[in-house]
C-alpha cells in the first residue's frame, strides 16, 4: 500500500522531500482545511495509507482532530515541540526539525487501534487529569508513548485512538515515579 503524507505548508513539504524525494505529499495550506481536501483524503484512504505529519502546536492538533474524524484510518507521525523549534526559538514546525528527527518520527508512525480498556476515571487515578501536576505527567506520558502532547481534555481520545491499555500507562508512569 502506498503512503501519502499530509503536511500543513510548503516548507513542511520541502523538508519532507529532503528526506525522500519520492514521497507523495499533500498540503493543507495551513490550519484551515477545505471540504474538498477532506473528500480527497477519504477517497485516497481506501487504497493508500494516509499519514498526518503536522506541527506540534494547536493548529497541528486541530488538523489531526478534523481529519481523523473524517478519515478514522489515518496514521500519525509526531515530532516533539522542542525538536521542531526554529533557530530563533519563536516558531514551531516540521520544517525546522532535523532530517534525523524526521526520519525517526517516520519510523515510529502510529496507527489507530480498535480496543482499549482505558476510562476517564483511570486517567484521574493516574493523576493525568484533575491534579496540580497533571500536565507534567501528561507531557512525560505523551513523550514516552510518542503520541504528541495533548491536553487533559484530549488525552483519553488520543490514547483510545492508538489502543493503549491500563497496563501500558502503568509501565510508563512507573518510570515517571523513578525519575
Image (cartoon, rainbow, N blue to C red):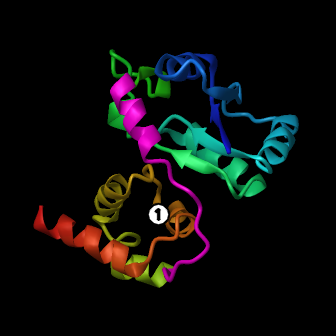
x and y, in percent, of residue 122 in the image: 42, 82
User: Is residue 32 shown above or below 77?
Assistant: above
Q: Residue at x 60, y 26 (%)?
A: 23
* Residue 74, horizontal then vertical, whole percent: 66, 51
The residue positioned farthest toward the front in the image shown: 1
**Helix, strand or loop under label 1:** helix
Would residue 10 be counted in the magenta stretch? no
Name the image quarter holding residue 142: bottom left
Magenta-drawn stretch contains 113: yes
Q: 54 or 127: which is nearer to us? A: 54
- Residue 26 appears in the picture as rendered: yes
Placement of the N terminus among the 4 image quadrants: top right
Can you see residue 63?
A: no
Count of picture labels: 1
User: Does residue 32 appear left or right of residue 135 in this picture?
Assistant: right
Q: Position of residue 126 (x, y in %)?
A: 33, 77
Q: Residue at x 46, y 84 (%)?
A: 121
Q: Read off the residue under disc 1.
A: 152
The residue positioned 60% from the left and 50% from the top of the image is 75
Instruction: Judge left or right: residue 26 versus residue 142.
Output: right
Badge 1: few (under 14), some or many (20 or more) residues near its Cα, within 10 Å? some
Query: Which region is colored magenta?
Result: 98-119
Q: Residue at x 29, y 57 (%)?
A: 140
Note whether 31 is above or below 11 in the view shown. Answer: below
Give the vertical position of 116 relative to 2 (above or below). Answer: below
Question: Which image quarter: residue 28?
Answer: top right
| Residue that protrudes farthest toward the left in the picture | 178
The C terminus sits in image quarter = bottom left
Amino acid at each position: 500500500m502506498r503512503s501519502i503524507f499530509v503536511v500543513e505548508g510548503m516548507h513542511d513539504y520541502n523538508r519532507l522531500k529532503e528526506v525522500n524525494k519520492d514521497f507523495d505529499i499533500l498540503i493543507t495550506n495551513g490550519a484551515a482545511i477545505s471540504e474538498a481536501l477532506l473528500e480527497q483524503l477519504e477517497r485516497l484512504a481506501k487504497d493508500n495509507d494516509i499519514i498526518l505529519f503536522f506541527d506540534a502546536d494547536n493548529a497541528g492538533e486541530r488538523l489531526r482532530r478534523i481529519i481523523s474524524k473524517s478519515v478514522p484510518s489515518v496514521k500519525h507521525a509526531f515530532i516533539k515541540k522542542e525538536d521542531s523549534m526554529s533557530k530563533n526559538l519563536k516558531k514551531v514546525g516540521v520544517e525546522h526539525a532535523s532530517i534525523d528527527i524526521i526520519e525517526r518520527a517516520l519510523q515510529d508512525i502510529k496507527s489507530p487501534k480498535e480496543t482499549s480498556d482505558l476510562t476517564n476515571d483511570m486517567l484521574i487515578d493516574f493523576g493525568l487529569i484533575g491534579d496540580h501536576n497533571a500536565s507534567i505527567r501528561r507531557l512525560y506520558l505523551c513523550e514516552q508513548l510518542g503520541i504528541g502532547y495533548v491536553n487533559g481534555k484530549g488525552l483519553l481520545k488520543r490514547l483510545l485512538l492508538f489502543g493503549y491499555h491500563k497496563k501500558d500507562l502503568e509501565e510508563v508512569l512507573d518510570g515517571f515515579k523513578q525519575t
